[in-house]
């Protein structure tokens, strides 16, 4: 077996992704009994190393070095019976020279010892459960903290002495009372303060509030459970009055009421149920306008090897974590505070003190962007008043209607000249396209119908509780609030018809269309048919979207929405899928998973997901057309995964660079000639079809 650079890189990759053994930054350790469970490549690698020495027989652990092609055999003769066995000998094999170096530890006064023995073996090892329980107790007692100081027998015994325990067999015994400690009689030591993270940027919940424009020049901010105080410092630098409190890091700071209060990732680190509830209530009592509540959300099975405690787990750092389901988190907030919290992202909720302001925020999230119509006709009189009329044009673009009395601060000047807003608008129409203004009004009308339809799932405000501006919107665009609600409810009745949804998707002017799904870029959402926006809103209004979502997938064979994250969508010709969040609209079950990093799903024909005004649309489209001409997209199943795509490029003698395809310079001339002829035929066929 030749261990060249590529071969060793493959070995390292298999070590780093192995589910068997104990992975450290520079090595993988595996018990000899677990060898057969390893990847075949690692088995062959180890089998090759055995040729270097006959003394290897009887080794306990095998160490795969990931920095250089070396493999070590470690001998722990008392592995099964000693809770922390000592190393008696080691044999290191250099795979390049196939030479072995033997080292004896049997006479050492302070030999290296093992911890966490269960990590080296498979779960069906005879003593796995015994090993695992010992580790759990040691973790709860904090005995395995600072692992660099317990690697040898002397230091380990000193630590046991300081903690007042000793270990007999695989049992931890408290010296003071001579009690055998078990998971049932041991209260874990929980270091809540260790859950606080030192951040270089604003936390995600506070950043979300800024992006939602909840901060105004007069806004005050208070961080309840501020940890190291990073958010306080950064919000203050942006010019807002900012303060906070933390029971560990800032216990002497006063609790101050503020417009915006942040309870960021606090309720998930409090193990005491009553104390957790109290923290949420206290933060709410300090809130004058909006409370930001965030918590860790259970997004995948990350709890393996953790210690169950109360309704959460004890982490390896002795902190507590309660992993909520997304809908469970909303239910908890709503029940404790008797509110209707608003999901804004995965694990982040806004709770408004004023119900009307909450509805204004909800409604704003379903408002499409509109551009003020351009001046298309040169009208002398309009030019004379263009500066005066600019605020009126902005208002109509925003609201889809004319303002009423006292809605526009420039009212006095405009009405002094034109008497009524309608007359002023008539002059605007002389210089612009009237159809564009009508389209703005219709877009605003559809936005409001989508918003109203979704209030059916929570609580729809009575007309009396609407803001004056909202009442005027409904009056101008629908005739009345009652009529708008009727139209919205009729719209909602049709959203459950998947056949109708599928038909609308197939007729859409944008999007990748499949038999059972429809995909669009997030930037296109507000331009879609209102019924599709409502369909997606049924998920996002209740659960929230995946942060940094790139693509939205409409499932057409089941009522589901998926949010897909392609971090390199704008820069990579074929970006890789990193994460997916799927919401089942029937029961609001949320599933979240990460893509295979070694062989992820990738995107093709990106331009189908976006509109022509998206940056680099033409570049995306030209590459896709070239790939179709070169026959690379004919069999879709062969290009879904990155490795399959790269193989296809190699088989077709193609290389991709800077959004262009090129023939490989090392390609077989005869094969290349045939491939070029196929490309020419496809182009000619496309040209005839176009003509």
Image (spheres, helix red, strand yellow):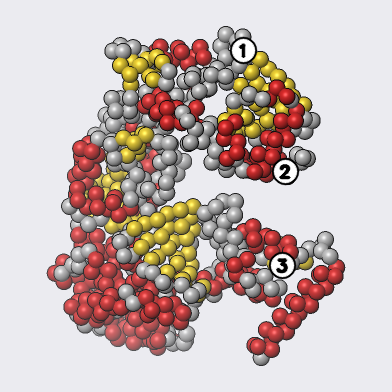
Q: Nearer the viewer, residue 386 or 91?
A: 91
**Residues at marks 3 and 1 touching, judged by CB atoms closer than 8 Å:** no
- What is the crowding at mark 3: few (fewer than 14 residues within 10 Å), some, or many (at least 20)? some
Horizontal and vertical percent for residue 333?
A: 24, 50
Q: In which quadrant of the rendered view does residue 245 lie?
A: top left
- What is the crowding at mark 2: few (fewer than 14 residues within 10 Å), some, or many (at least 20)? some
Q: What residue is at 78 percent from the left and 40 percent from the top? A: 2
Horizontal and vertical percent for residue 12?
A: 65, 40
Q: What residue is at 22 percent from the left and 36 percent from the top? A: 275
Residue highlighted by disc 3: 661
Distance in Å between CA atoms under marks 1 and 2: 35 Å
Relative to 322, is 455 above or below? below
**Residues at marks 2 and 3 touching, judged by CB atoms closer than 8 Å:** no
Relative to 491, is 91 above or below? above
> In the drawing, does residue 506 fall left or right of residue 209?
right
Residue highlighted by disc 1: 106
């Amino acid at each position: 077996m030749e261990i060249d650079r590529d071969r060793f890189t493959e070995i390292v990759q298999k070590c780093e992704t192995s589910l068997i053994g104990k992975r450290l930054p520079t090595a993988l350790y595996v018990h000899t009994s677990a060898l057969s469970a390893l990847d075949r490549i690692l088995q062959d690698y180890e089998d090759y190393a055995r040729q270097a020495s006959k003394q290897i027989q009887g080794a306990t652990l095998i160490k795969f070095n990931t920095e250089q092609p070396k493999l070590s055999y470690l001998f722990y003769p008392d592995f099964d019976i000693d809770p922390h066995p000592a190393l008696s000998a080691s044999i290191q094999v250099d795979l390049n020279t196939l030479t072995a170096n033997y080292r004896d530890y049997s006479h050492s006064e302070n030999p290296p010892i093992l911890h966490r023995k269960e990590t080296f073996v498979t779960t069906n090892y005879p003593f796995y459960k015994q090993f695992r329980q010992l580790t759990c107790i040691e973790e709860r007692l904090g005995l395995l903290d600072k692992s660099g100081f317990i690697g040898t027998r002397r230091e380990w015994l000193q630590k046991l002495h300081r903690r007042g325990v000793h270990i007999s067999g695989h049992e931890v015994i408290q010296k003071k009372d001579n009690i055998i400690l078990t998971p049932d009689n041991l209260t874990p030591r929980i270091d809540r303060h260790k859950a606080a993270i030192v951040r270089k940027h604003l936390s995600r919940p506070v950043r979300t509030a800024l992006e939602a424009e909840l901060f105004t020049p007069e806004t005050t901010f208070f961080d309840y459970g501020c940890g190291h105080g990073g958010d306080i410092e950064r919000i203050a630098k942006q010019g807002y009055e900012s303060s906070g409190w933390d029971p560990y890091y800032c216990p002497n700071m006063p609790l101050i009421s503020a417009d915006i209060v942040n309870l960021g990732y606090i309720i998930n680190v409090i193990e005491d149920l009553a104390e957790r509830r109290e923290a949420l209530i206290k933060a709410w009592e300090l809130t004058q306008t909006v409370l930001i509540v965030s918590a860790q959300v259970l997004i995948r099975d990350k709890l393996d090897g953790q210690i169950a405690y109360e309704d959460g787990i004890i982490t390896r750092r002795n902190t507590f974590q309660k992993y909520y389901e997304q809908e469970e988190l909303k239910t908890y907030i709503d029940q404790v505070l008797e509110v209707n919290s608003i999901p804004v992202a995965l694990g982040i909720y806004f709770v408004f003190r004023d119900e009307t302001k909450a509805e204004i925020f909800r409604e704003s999230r379903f408002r499409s962007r509109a551009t003020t119509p351009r001046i298309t006709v040169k009208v002398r009189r309009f030019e004379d008043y263009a500066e005066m009329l600019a605020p009126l044009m902005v208002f109509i673009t925003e609201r889809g209607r004319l303002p009423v009395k006292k809605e526009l601060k420039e009212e006095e000047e405009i009405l002094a000249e034109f008497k009524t807003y309608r007359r002023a608008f008539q002059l605007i129409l002389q210089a612009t396209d009237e159809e564009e203004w009508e389209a703005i009004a219709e877009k605003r009308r559809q936005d409001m119908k989508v918003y109203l339809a979704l209030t059916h799932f929570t609580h729809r405000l009575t007309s009396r509780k609407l803001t004056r501006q909202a009442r005027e919107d409904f009056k101008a665009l629908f005739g009345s609030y009652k009529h708008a609600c009727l139209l919205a409810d009729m719209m909602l009745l049709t959203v459950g018809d998947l056949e109708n949804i599928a038909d609308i998707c197939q007729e859409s002017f944008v999007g990748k269309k499949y038999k059972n799904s429809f995909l669009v870029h997030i930037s296109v959402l507000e331009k879609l048919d209102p019924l599709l926006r409502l369909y997606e809103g049924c998920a996002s209004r209740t659960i929230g979207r995946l942060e940094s979502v790139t693509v939205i997938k409409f499932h057409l064979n089941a009522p589901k929405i998926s949010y897909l994250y392609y971090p390199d969508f704008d820069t990579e010709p074929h970006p890789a899928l990193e994460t997916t969040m799927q919401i089942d609209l029937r029961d609001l079950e949320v599933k979240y998973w990460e893509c295979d990093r070694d062989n992820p799903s990738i995107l093709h024909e990106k331009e189908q997901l976006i509109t022509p005004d998206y940056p680099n649309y033409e570049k995306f489209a030209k590459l896709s057309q070239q790939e179709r001409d070169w026959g690379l997209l004919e069999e879709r199943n062969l290009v879904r995964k990155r490795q399959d795509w790269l193989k296809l490029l190699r088989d077709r003698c193609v290389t991709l660079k800077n959004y262009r395809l090129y023939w490989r310079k090392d390609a077989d001339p005869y094969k290349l000639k045939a491939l070029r002829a196929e490309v020419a035929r496809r182009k000619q066929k496309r040209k005839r079809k176009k003509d």
